[in-house]
């Protein structure tokens, strides 16, 4: 079985300006120096700071992701940033279908799938987010919702999807301080891996990383990462501080 390299992603959302980013990286790169060989660490700033972050992380193993992208190479899409533009800036990763994009900005499955197609065409590594709302969990619809969100993956070949990362982020756990228990995360991660095995291929399922996101902190990172199908963490609030995010990575690698 191929080893799945642990992956830790900081989603800064609409936070941090240039000065904050410079001071974060100055401190963070020293804190994670000894860890970047045993995992991948990715920082996702607001789009306007991508070029700057690429430049200040140049001589490190820290990688950079966009938080979103448009669904075409170019065209009349005011306010959008295309995957071609991300590639041009040497941004290799993109988060897609984050719950805030799905629920605040009303991105539906077909739009998220269009963005995925456009991102894959530019050879970006997509971090494809899925997750159920609280009422959906309460109604025992978690698996049905995840299955619906994954459905679009069937329209791609295994080789097109080769770099795909999936992030399970229960909407009720994002920014609420209430993380899914390690067992709840494992149950859904295992469901996703089985789905990938049945619908793409067993080899693909074995090597694809599935991240957990939702109120991750240093004190729950080991317990989540211990789970056999949790391959990494997507972190919002607790990634804004370099000490806190580096501690999440350190504790996660201690699992
Ligand atoms: C996120 O934004 O992807 C996230 C998981 O946020 P938080 O860690 O703040 O819950």
Image: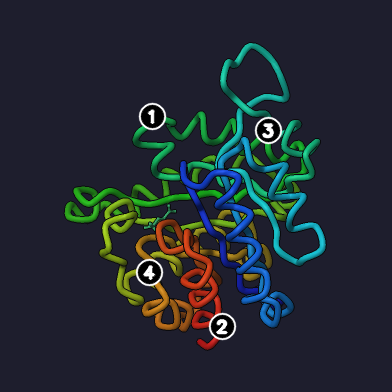
Please give the residue where the numbered disc 1 appears in the rendered image: 106
Mark 2 neighbour density, 10 Å: few (under 14) some (14–19) many (20 or more): some
Query: What residue appears at the point 70 percent right and 58 percent down from the top-left corner?
Result: 63
Query: What residue appears at the point 50 percent right and 72 percent down from the top-left corner?
Result: 243
3D distance between C-alphas at marks 3 and 2 = 33 Å
Mark 4 neighbour density, 10 Å: few (under 14) some (14–19) many (20 or more): many
Q: Position of residue 115 (x, y in %)?
A: 60, 33
Marks 1 and 4, the one that precedes in the sequence: 1
Identify the element where label 4 is drawn: helix
Marks 2 and 4, the one that precedes in the sequence: 4
Query: What residue appears at the point 67 percent right and 49 percent down from the top-left corner?
Result: 93
Along the viewing direction, whichever of 12 and 115 lies nearer the viewer? 12
Please give the residue where the numbered disc 3 appears in the rendered image: 118
Compared with 32, 43 (above or below) is above
Marks 3 and 2, the one that precedes in the sequence: 3
Identify the element where label 3 is drawn: helix
Compared with 229, 91 (above or below) is above
Mark 1 neighbour density, 10 Å: few (under 14) some (14–19) many (20 or more): few
Give the quarter of the figure containing the N terminus: bottom right
Q: Position of residue 101 (x, y in %)?
A: 43, 37
Marks 2 and 1, the one that precedes in the sequence: 1
Disc 3 residue lies near ligand 1 with CB under 8 A: no
3D distance between C-alphas at marks 3 and 4 = 29 Å
Q: Position of residue 203 (x, y in %)?
A: 68, 67
Please give the residue where the numbered disc 4 appears in the rendered image: 185
């Amino acid at each position: 079985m191929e080893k799945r390299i642990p992956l830790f992603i900081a989603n800064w959302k609409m936070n941090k300006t240039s000065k904050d980013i410079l001071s974060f990286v100055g401190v963070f790169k020293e804190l994670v120096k000894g860890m970047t060989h045993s995992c991948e660490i990715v920082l996702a700033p607001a789009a306007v700071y991508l070029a700057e972050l690429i430049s200040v992380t140049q001589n490190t193993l820290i990688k950079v992701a966009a938080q979103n992208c448009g669904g075409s190479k170019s065209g009349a899409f005011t306010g959008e940033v295309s995957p071609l533009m991300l590639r041009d800036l040497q941004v290799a990763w993109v988060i897609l279908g984050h719950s805030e994009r799905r629920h605040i900005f009303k991105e539906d499955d077909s739009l998220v799938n269009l963005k995925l197609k456009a991102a894959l065409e530019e050879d970006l590594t997509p971090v494809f987010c899925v997750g159920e709302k609280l009422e959906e969990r309460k109604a025992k619809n978690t698996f049905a919702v995840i299955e619906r969100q994954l459905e679009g993956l069937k329209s791609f070949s295994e080789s097109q999807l080769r770099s795909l990362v999936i992030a399970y982020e229960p909407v009720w756990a994002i920014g609420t301080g209430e993380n899914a228990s390690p067992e709840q995360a494992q149950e859904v991660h295992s469901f996703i891996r089985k789905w990938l095995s049945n619908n793409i291929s067993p080899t693909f399922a074995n090597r694809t990383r599935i991240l957990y996101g939702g109120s991750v902190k240093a004190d729950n990172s080991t317990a989540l990462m211990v789970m056999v199908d949790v391959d990494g963490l997507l972190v919002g609030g607790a990634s804004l501080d370099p000490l806190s995010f580096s501690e999440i990575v350190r504790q996660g690698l201690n699992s």
